[in-house]
Image (cartoon, rainbow, N blue to C red):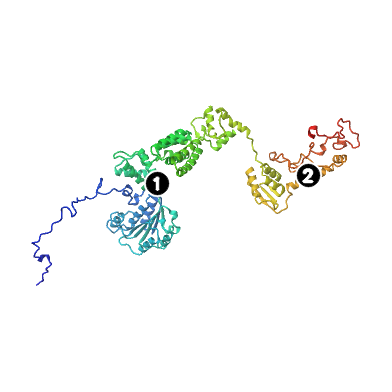
Amino acid sequence: MTPVDPSSPDTDPCRDTLPEPEQPSGPGLFGDAPATPPARTAAGTQPYRVLARQYRPRHFDDLIGQDALVRTLRNAFALNRVAHAFMLTGVRGVGKTTTARIIARALNCTGIDGQGGPTADPCGVCPNCTAILADRHPDVVEMDAASRTGVDDVREIIEATRFRPLQARTKVFIIDEVHMLSRNAFNALLKTLEEPPPHVTFIFATTELRKVPVTVLSRCQRFDLRRIDAEVLSAHFSRILEQEGVSASPQALALIARAADGSVRDGLSLLDQAIAQNDPGIPISEAQVADMLGLADRGMVLDLLEVLMAGDTASALAVTDTAHARGADLGMVLQDLLELIHTLTRLKTIPHLRTAPGMAEAERLRGSALADRLAMPVLGRAWQMLLKGIAEVEAAPDRRAAAEMVLIRLCYVADLPPPAELVRRLTGAPGTQQPGYQGGGVVAPSPPSSSPTASSTGFRAIAGGIMSGGSGAATARQPHAMADSVPDVPVPVFHSFREVAQFVESRREAMLHAHLLHNVHLVRFAPPVIELRLESNVPHTLPAQLAALLGEANGQRWTIALSSAPGEPTLAEQGRAAGESRLAQASNHPVVRAILNAFPGARLGTVIDSTVDVYGLTRETHADPGMMTASPILGGGHGDRFDSLDEIPGDPDDGPGFAPLDAEPADDPSGDAFPGLNRPTQSEQS
């Protein structure tokens, strides 16, 4: 007989007599509490997901603008040559983390039937794909290196690589912003990164590749993700808006794409904001996007550049006041001007860009016309001034005031001629400027007017004290008058070392000239090479100083070599020797001896010879007159100068210029015993 369990419900004698307790259906213990319905949104039961997350690519084909990356990874999966470590680098929002997740799914996809292997086209429905998409797969670990930078965090990853995957085929470690890891963390990762287990794959993402050690880069397969072109971004945004049921003008999408600066995520965030700002059912306009971004209208920027290049300061400030009243940041206006200058320069240098499909109609028409009117020096000068002005605006306490000062400066120099044209105007040389040249390089479609107003306008930019006042005709004649007063400066040609010394003296290099005169011995003169011997008191910088001075004079590269050879005497020594020789020759002349005999106690002083140069040496016939100086350093005294002693007046048969000593004095009212000799006049004696 089987024993009966008294605890069994079938044997409970009170089972049929005790009623079941009632389920609570009324108010709770603490009073009435209405039932809370599940959270719902106006659009549906799920909370809103931003466009950047909702339209995140799930396959390699969904990546835009990364053709090289997609082609390489597809071939790697097809050939079963997938690397064990990847380094994805690029600016923000171009798809680094998205690519890493696609690689993780491609490595672990099992297909719809659960039997598939690694593939470049993950199915998206298998357990591994769905878990990775939901960010809850145990074998795909994502770590943000910006918040976990230490070696202990890396040690956890190294320990995890020792164990096989729990569910997937490959354990994938995705480390974002890997450049934020510390040096010790990188060093701890090197060995595992070089020889990882066969079931481990590392995927690194960074925006600062230069901060990643080279030892880490050499162990990874590197991919540089490109910035997305504005045209590609605009087309991508248009497809997304079509799926969202929202319309927008192409100009508005172009503004968003330009503001995104090649980043898909930034562009989608701006697109989300534009959709929320716009009224339902109304297309998103360019004006609304410009107002949202704090930008000036493109047409307004073109208007501003035109009045700036015309030098109209009042109109330029009026345009900026209007832009500021609309909420535009004047610093951003300068950025827009800088971008427009770059666009005009490209249109001027590459004409076929005017038919490019991605260019706005306003830039195509007005920009092309403005590029034709502005000369290249004007565009380059405006670019430099705006580039410097933007930095000033960023550092200024009042951005608006700083931006207005930049624009005023730009107006002031807008019609300033280029340096070459300014020199041609001042010297009166024949110009080679373009037809219709005006002011600072603006090329007008017709020749410039010859009226006084037009003439004076061309030189208005020089009114800093060089030219001012006067009528237009007088201003127009000013360059020719200046051209007549500007002499032609010949390029000196040096035939001897003496000419070099004379040139140095003419340049007012007193110390250098003194050394060349007294302390330098010439060994060899073979321009542009000069070999010298210097005395001990000469500074060691003399060769370089002399070479620089000569090179500046004639444009040649001179070499001043030092030698230990004796060389010639110095110029001062040669001059003294030549002076002593002339003095001895004059002392032995019969006329001089006769004079000395006639005047006891007289002595011969300085011999003045017009055939010698300033150094007391015979003048060189090939010397350049332009290099000679008129300041004598030897000679002196009173009396007439003769080219030689033989030119003294007198009878050539009786000697050079004197009567015989035994002759009777001539009947001269002045009582001169030597009538043949020219005496100083009364004024000369005084």
Q: Nearer the viewer, mark 1 or mark 2?
A: 2
Task: Please state the horizontal and vertical placement of residue 660, each as a whole percent of the image.
Answer: 89, 36
Determine whether, in the image, residue 603 is placed left or right of residue 198: right
Residue 116, by quadrant, is bottom left
Badge 2 crowding class, 10 Å Cα cut-off, few under 14, some 14 to 19, many 20 or more, is many
Determine whether, in the image, residue 607 is placed left or right of residue 400: right
Residue 251, by quadrant, is top left
**In the structure shown, which secondary structural element does the residue marked by tag 1 occupy?**
loop
Residue 124 visible in image: yes
Q: Mark 1 = which residue?
A: 262
Circles 1, 2 touching at the beta carbon (< 8 Å): no
The Cα–Cα distance between marks 1 and 2, rounded to whole angstroms, is 84 Å
Of callouts 1 and 2, the N-terminal one = 1
- Residue 377, relative to residue 44: is it above or below? above
Badge 1 crowding class, 10 Å Cα cut-off, few under 14, some 14 to 19, many 20 or more, is many
- Residue 14, relative to residue 477: is it above or below? below
- Residue 630, relative to residue 137: is it above or below? above
Amino acid type indicated by mark 1: Gly
Q: Mark 2 = which residue?
A: 579
Q: How many marks?
A: 2
Determine whether, in the image, residue 388 is placed left or right of residue 358: right
